[in-house]
């Protein structure tokens, strides 16, 4: 036998040995091309990944709970799996199961809590949801995340996609949102605060950043707020007055509105409002924890998508005049 034939024979033998070895190994994942029927799979509030994995294996969705836990641990997005009832296929790979559990379109009776929503917004969504109990609507026992919150849930209800089992109480649904916020805030590092500002103070700032800016300039808006606080300047934010006067969504604010007697009136009162004014997004929280570098004290959105920052009041006043002209011309719609 010549050298080439020997090499070919050895290669073939090695290949056959490898195939035999793989066949002897336990297969801990279903193939990706043979999914089964679709079922409803329920995840309880606060349920751990290991418990989800065990239930998925028992239901025949995945082949191995161990494999699911491995993939769950490797995938940072897996932490975003929501409690509730999910549509999911049987006999799928663990990674596919994670993808299906993360798909909001597969949540039964989907409830969407938007970024920047308030407690009143959340309650309205819950009351309109078919899976929420209409007979048990009390929620006074639900505790907010931070003890200094003056018993307000504002800022403690994380904006996300949720799904609940039929006849879920409002208290149980709100508790799930608080638990989600706790996990998200811990992951973001909010519990460490920022400089001299405590976690709850940073949460208030993030809630204002959410309403005042847009994601591309959240960090600059956060810096303006910190700069004003650091020099004892009133925040003078329309968003806090709009929150107090139920004028959210208005482009302009009248002089009369800025004179209302409210602890949320940051035109008349120096410092932070008593509670957050919205449920902030991950991006707004990140901006409050890592504001941009700058000496700005003023900002204004002159046109949609055109927000400007300055430390010069005269420049800000000129931009404000330009803003008023654009409002009058109907450019904010």
Image: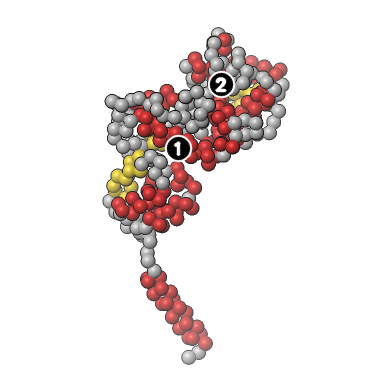
- Write down the quadrant of residue 80 in the picture: top left
- Write down the quadrant of residue 270 in the picture: top right
User: Residue 194 location, x and y as percent?
Assistant: 62, 34
Pick whichever, 331 or 129, lies toward us. 129
Upstream in sequence: badge 2 or badge 1: 1
Real-space Cα distance between discs 2 and 1? 24 Å
Compared to 95, does 331 lie above or below?
above
Snapshot colouring: secondary structure
**Residue found at the very far top of the displayed protein:** 256
- For label 1, the crowd category at 10 Å Cα-Cα, with few meaning under 14, some 14 to 19 and many 20 or more, is many
Tag 1 secondary structure: helix
Pick whichever, 134 or 250, lies toward us. 134
Q: Which residue is drawn at 40% across and 31% down?
A: 174
Compared to 6, does 256 lie above or below?
above
Pick whichever, 169 or 90, lies toward us. 169
User: Residue 41 location, x and y as percent?
Assistant: 32, 45
Q: In this view, does 292 lie to the left or right of 5?
A: right
Q: Residue at x 33, y 41 (%)?
A: 85
Tag 2 secondary structure: loop
User: Residue 23 location, x and y as percent?
Assistant: 37, 71
Q: In this view, does 45 lie to the left or right of 329?
A: left
Q: Please indicate, yes or no, whether residue 282 appears anywhere in the rendered image.
A: yes
For disc 2, the marked residue is 273
- For label 2, the crowd category at 10 Å Cα-Cα, with few meaning under 14, some 14 to 19 and many 20 or more, is many
For disc 1, the marked residue is 180
For the residues labelled 2 and 1, say whether their Cβ atoms are less than 8 Å apart. Answer: no
């Amino acid at each position: 036998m010549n050298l080439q034939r020997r090499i070919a024979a050895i290669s073939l033998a090695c290949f056959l040995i490898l195939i035999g070895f793989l066949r002897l190994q336990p297969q801990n994942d279903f193939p990706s091309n043979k999914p089964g029927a679709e079922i409803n799979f329920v995840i309880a509030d606060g349920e751990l990944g290991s418990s989800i994995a065990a239930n998925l294996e028992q239901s025949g969705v995945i082949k191995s709970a161990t494999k699911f836990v491995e993939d769950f641990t490797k995938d940072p997005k897996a932490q975003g799996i929501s409690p509730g009832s999910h549509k999911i296929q049987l006999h799928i790979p663990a990674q596919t199961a994670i993808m299906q559990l993360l798909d909001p379109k597969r949540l039964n009776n989907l409830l969407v809590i938007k970024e920047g929503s308030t407690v009143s917004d959340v309650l309205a969504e819950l009351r309109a949801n078919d899976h929420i109990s209409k007979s048990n609507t009390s929620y006074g026992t639900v505790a907010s995340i931070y003890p200094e919150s003056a018993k307000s849930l504002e800022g403690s209800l994380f904006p996300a996609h949720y799904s609940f089992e039929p006849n879920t109480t409002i208290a149980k649904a709100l508790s799930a949102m608080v638990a989600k916020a706790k996990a998200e805030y811990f992951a973001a590092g909010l519990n460490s605060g920022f400089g001299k500002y405590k976690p709850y103070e940073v949460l208030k700032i993030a809630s204002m950043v959410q309403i005042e800016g847009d994601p591309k300039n959240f960090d600059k808006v956060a810096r303006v707020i910190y700069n004003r606080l650091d020099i004892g300047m009133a925040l003078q934010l329309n968003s806090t007055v709009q929150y107090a006067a139920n004028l959210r969504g208005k482009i302009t604010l009248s002089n009369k509105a800025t004179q209302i007697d409210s602890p949320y009136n940051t035109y008349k009162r120096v410092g932070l409002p008593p509670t957050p004014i919205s449920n902030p997004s991950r991006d707004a929280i990140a901006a409050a924890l890592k504001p941009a570098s700058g000496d700005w004290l003023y900002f204004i959105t002159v046109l949609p998508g055109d927000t400007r920052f300055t430390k010069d009041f005269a420049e800000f006043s000129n931009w404000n005049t330009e803003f008023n002209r654009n409002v009058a011309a109907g450019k904010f719609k």
